[in-house]
Image (spheres, grey):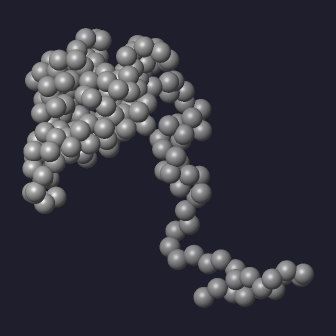
Amino acid sequence: MPVITRHPGGPVRAAPFTVGPVVDRRALGGWLSGPRSVAEAAGIDLGYPGKRLGLPEEGQNAVGGMTRRLVATFIDWTVAQLIVLGAMPDSTSGDRAGPILGVFVLINVTLVSTIGAGVGGRLLGLRVARLDGGNPLPLYVMLRTLLLALVIPALFIDRDYRGVHDRVARSIVVKR
């Protein structure tokens, strides 16, 4: 139970109490701001995203930012929804869920294999590249897209902004 104390000239306050172990704010702050900030606070220089892969910091072939990548994926998903809605105008949203995912996968596999980016990536100046800079092979694009469709693998990124789907496919999203 908290202890009520009166501070001279101030309001009545309850003294804090704890149940269980005390958590250091720095540990919580590190968790909230991510591993990069914890490493930097410890004096470890991680460099910019793509440095360890030999990519430039800015400009063409620099690592594409996460916001731009998320917006590109949203655009691709919206295109898939519009295609399915046009093909199935009288269906319910539940009936369209599977076809939307199928169209999303088909569009991504086709476009990333041929031009290096989906509709959203093309509009936002991004492309999927192999680690040596070339276009990814169709088999790797298919594997990457199927993992991307599962969503969860894309949430676990490394310091170069590569999700599990990119690491498995040996690819990276860069600026065109």
The N terminus, quarter of image: bottom right
In the image, what residue occupies the spot 55% across and 62% down? 23
Q: Nearer the viewer, residue 33 or 27?
A: 33
Q: Nearer the viewer, residue 58 or 35?
A: 58
Give the left or right position of residue 126, taking residue 106 as reference.
right
Given the current orientation, which residue lies at the most extreme right position? Answer: 9
Q: Quadrant of residue 18?
A: bottom right
Q: Position of residue 14 (x, y in %)?
A: 70, 83
In the image, what residue occupies the spot 16% across and 32% down? 107
Q: Nearer the viewer, residue 137 or 90?
A: 90
Up the image or down, 127 lies above or below 103; here it is above
Up the image or down, 26 lies above or below 18; here it is above
Q: Nearer the viewer, residue 94 or 170?
A: 94
Give the left or right position of residue 3, taking residue 166 as reference.
right
Q: Does residue 149 appear in the picture of this structure?
A: no
In the image, what residue occupies the spot 50% across and 37% down? 36
